[in-house]
Image: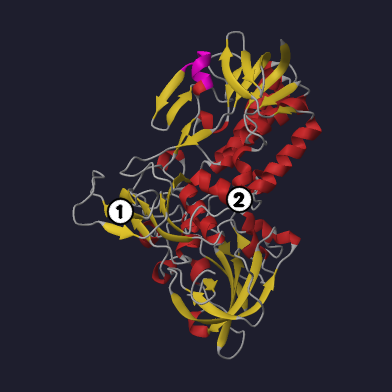
Amino acid sequence: MKRYELIVIDAGPAGLSAAIEGAKAGMRVAVFDENARPGGQLFKQIHKFFGSKEHKAKIRGFRIGEMLLQEAEEAGVNVQLNATVLGIFPEKRITVRFADHVEQFSGDNIIVATGAAENMVLFDGWTKPGVIGAGAAQTLMNLHGVQPGQNILMVGSGNVGLVVSYQLLQAGCKVAALIDAAPRVGGYGVHAAKVARYGVPFYMRHTILRAEGKDQVEGAVIAEVDDKFQPIPGTEKHLDVDTICLAVGLSPMSQVLRMSGCEIDDTPGGLVPKTDAYGETTIPGLFAAGDVAGIEEASSAMIGGRIAGLAAAHRAGYLDDAAFQTQAEAARASLTQLRQGMFAKENRGRTDLTETEEGYELSQNLLAKGYVTEEELQAFPAASEKRGGVHPVIECTQNIPCNPCQDACKFGCIMVGRQITSIPQIEHGKRCTGCGMCVASCSGQAIFLVDDDYDETRAAITMAYEFLPYPEKGQKGTALSRAGRPLCEAEVLSLRKSAATDGTALLTIAVPKEFSMQARAFAFDGGVD
């Protein structure tokens, strides 16, 4: 039986991070993953991460996956793919099934980072071809280059539903609607705004009743729900769609942990192992990291993996007490940053939040329809101030953990401060050069450069643009409002790309001056091409 000082189950973001920390400390590490390629969900994620530079903010998920794989290789981590762990047995032994045989391994320490599986919601016709999970849609689009469908209903308004809806638009699909039984949008408002500005309607307090079609999805019927989440008769709506995409939450994949005999907690978020502050379960030397220990964002999973890897190295004697405490506490402080703001665990499910931490009134329209109205934005100085020359307009109106805009501006025009969840502010007395780096760095595409003095009749607006084909200079199109409604004709002034913007094009359009604080998207012929 082969023995390793550290065995990691699953090569996703948490597992790779844990393996890297163990190997860097000097441990002999093996990672087993049932998939044909490592990296887990990261390689499906083409959007930019939130957080700070330390959390790999403004870097796309698949880029982070590439970085982790390179770091694991350099650290000497032994990653074995197409290797399914069948169970964890006494004395920290595991059984692994390969293509044509089964082997047993023993580990002085084991870290389980098996992640989570998509939830489903049952409705009439839910087994028809054309009903898929959001993760499956991402796999089709971002790994295989295949459209999941042409006309899609998204069920679920959490970050997964919002992010995948936007990626469906990028893939050339139409998103007919985004629905959720909850009374308010569950994910980041900046994610919702990206979707709404391209004309996707939000139906909160709505559920799906049935999928229509004989052999496949040919339509969907939705209805409004009451306070007990029961459909209200007479509120049914028919949608012409060929695909129903479900983003209704995740459940931890804790099966091997439950087999191990460690203590399991039955929580509202699923069956999760009872762990200490460093991820160690009630079985000494058996750790849990990432979504299997509780559903969070990938950034949190990577830090949780790092902490578990450090704890395993300390337990094995590769890190002394002082080194372990220093590194682990730094990682825990970083994790705490990501768990702050209005989306912190203690705020989940709350419907009574009416103000930001700074006292700005939260947009109720954003929570109900996915976009902030121009009137609501007046409460936010960075989103409403008009002045001569080019200047940033920041439509970030919630306390989310993110500050790349502050680092991007080399001239100090934007300030978030030490509290990572603070609403960005414009620093007066600082001159904006129009470089656009703040626009490109914003993970939520919430920053625009506005120049009301472009010429006598028109203003220039610079925005992030992530659709193909790219518009060309001089091309005419339509400027869209925050609600995705056509506003006016727009002319393309320029489109800039560089390695520094990591694939985000900076599109500058000219619109009549009166629309400078309303135009927030560009489309060919009034819609996304």
Image-based side of 243 in relation to 14, left or right = left
CA gap, disc 1 and disc 2:
28 Å
Say above or below: 230 vs 190.
Answer: above
User: Which residue is at the front of the view, 108 or 400?
Assistant: 108
Amino acid type, label 2: Asn
Residue displayed at 76% across by 25% down: 25
Q: Position of residue 46 (x, y in %)?
A: 61, 52
Q: Which mark is residue 222?
A: 1
> What stretch of residues is rendered in magenta?
256-263
Determine which quarter of the picture holds residue 8: top right
Local packing at callout 1 (Cα closer than 10 Å; few below 14, some 14-19, many 20+) is many
Secondary structure beneath dot 1 equals strand
Residue 317 coordinates in the image, percent (x, y): 73, 16
**Magenta stretch contains residue 470:** no
- The quadrant of the picture occupied by the C terminus is bottom right
Q: Residue 430's x, y, as percent?
A: 66, 70
- Any mark on residue 498, and which? none
Asked whether the viewer can see residue 379, the reply is yes
Residue type, label 1: Ile
Q: Which class describes the residues within 10 Å of circle 2: few (<14), some (14-19), or many (20+)?
A: some
Q: Which mark is residue 142?
A: 2
Q: Earlier in the sequence, mark 1 or mark 2?
A: 2
Q: Residue at x 70, y 58 (%)?
A: 502
Q: Secondary structure at mark 2?
A: helix
Of the 4 image quadrants, the one containing the N terminus is: top right
Q: In the rendered picture of this protein, how many numbered marks are placed on residues?
A: 2
Give the residue displayed 50% in from the left and 28% down from the top: 253
Does the segment drawn in magenta span residue 262?
Answer: yes
Q: Quadrant of residue 108?
A: top right
Q: Nearer the viewer, residue 115 or 183?
A: 115
Q: Is residue 527 left or right of residue 429?
A: left
The answer to whether residue 477 is left or right of residue 357 is right
